Amino acid sequence: MKELINPLNKAFESRIRLGIMSVLMVNDWVEFTDMKEMLDITDGNLASHITALEKLGYVEVRKQFVGKKPNTTYGATKAGKKAFNEHLDALEKLLKNRE
Amino acid sequence: MEQIEDNPHRHLEDLQQIRTIMERSSRFISLSGFSGVFVGIFALIGEYIAVQHFHVDPFNFDLNSYGVLHGLPFFGNEYATPLVPGWHFSLKYDFTYFMVDAVIVLLLSLFAATTMSWRRARINGDKVWNAASKRLLANLFIPLAAGGIFCIAMLYQHYVDLIIPATLIFYGIALFNAGKYTLNDIRFLGIIEICLGLLCCFFTPISLVLWGLGFGVMHIVYGIVMYYKYER
């Protein structure tokens, strides 16, 4: 049965974005390299998806310098957490309706 | 709003993947529980060696009457006033013996836990040195270091009665705290260590028995349980 309004968030259609949000739901601030390792993806791939999420206001980027090295960390915004939770609820509901 | 392709298989996979990533990115799941068996055996052997060397009765033990402290730097040289009047025997060597015994047990235990966790991480396709394992170590070692320094402070202040219970209590708190960042089961071991430590505060004459139970037997039991639960 198809519902009239699809509650799934288009922003989380990609697996990589789901992955990024999952990591940020349980970790406050995550470094670029750590994120890359956790999701096992390339720099470019991660950067483009993070930028997309940042534009939507779901991810916050923090740039600092640790000594002379630039250090970029990412965190989920309140809006991002809310949107992701709604997306998860929608996924669960869709699966339940099928049983 | 555009429709996302309504594919139940995909939704299920998505949810499973989300769960796995959340778990993996926040917890270091490769900490080897089975290494607990070795840690426990090392602790028991170490304790046995110390008990034999110092001829103490583990069922009626009083650290106060025992001059184990006298080799310590802040107790002065071997001619320092003995803690117990009439104790005219330099225990410098004995304290050294005790420390060497303790440090060997510690190093062997750390070695077993690290190498076996390394192996598990390889099996799980996990990295050993990642954000999750760093956080686990910080959460384990901060309470543990505080406990260690506290025990040294008690030696320094000559409050020796509660040193053995303190090792159990702080170790238990460290494990309980670390449980948030690895498999949850270790929290139960932490609670048991805390309880044994608190019991030990009231029953100091059997503190060596309780110590052996906590650091020896409980580690072995924990290791066997973890082996059957996750690592077989």
Image (spheres, helix red, strand yellow):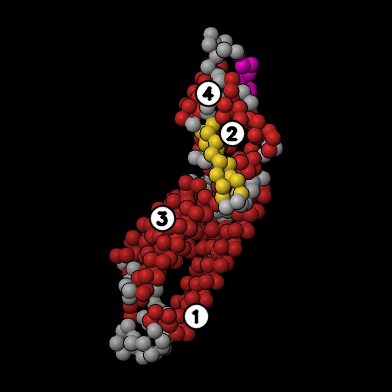
Q: Is residue B82 above or below residue B13?
A: below
Q: Amino acid at mark 1?
A: Tyr
Assign the N terminus of chain B to one quadrant of the image: top right
Q: Secondary structure at mark 1?
A: helix
Write the residue at 52% across / 20% down: A90
Write the residue at 37% across / 74% down: B155
Asked if the residue under mark 4 is in contact with the one under mark 1, i.e. CB atoms within 8 Å, the reply is no
Marks 2 & 4 on one chain: yes
Residue at image mark 2: A20
Q: CA distance from mark 1 to mark 4?
A: 62 Å
Q: Is residue A68 left or right of residue B100?
A: right
Q: CA distance from mark 1 to mark 2?
A: 53 Å
Q: CA distance from mark 2 to mark 3?
A: 32 Å
Q: CA distance from mark 2 to mark 4?
A: 14 Å
x and y percent of residue B71 in the render?
A: 43, 82
Q: Secondary structure at mark 4?
A: helix
Q: Residue furthest top?
A: A4
Write the residue at 57% across / 52% down: A67
Q: Amino acid at mark 3?
A: Ile
Q: Amino acid at mark 4?
A: His
Q: Secondary structure at mark 2?
A: helix
Tell which tag, 1 or 2, sits nearer the viewer: 2
Tell which tag, 2 or 4, sits nearer the viewer: 2
Extent of the magenta region: B3-11
Q: Amino acid at mark 2?
A: Ile
Residue at image mark 1: B97
Tell which tag, 1 or 4, sits nearer the viewer: 4
Residue at image mark 3: B173
x and y percent of residue B31 in the render?
A: 57, 52
Q: Residue furthest front?
A: A68
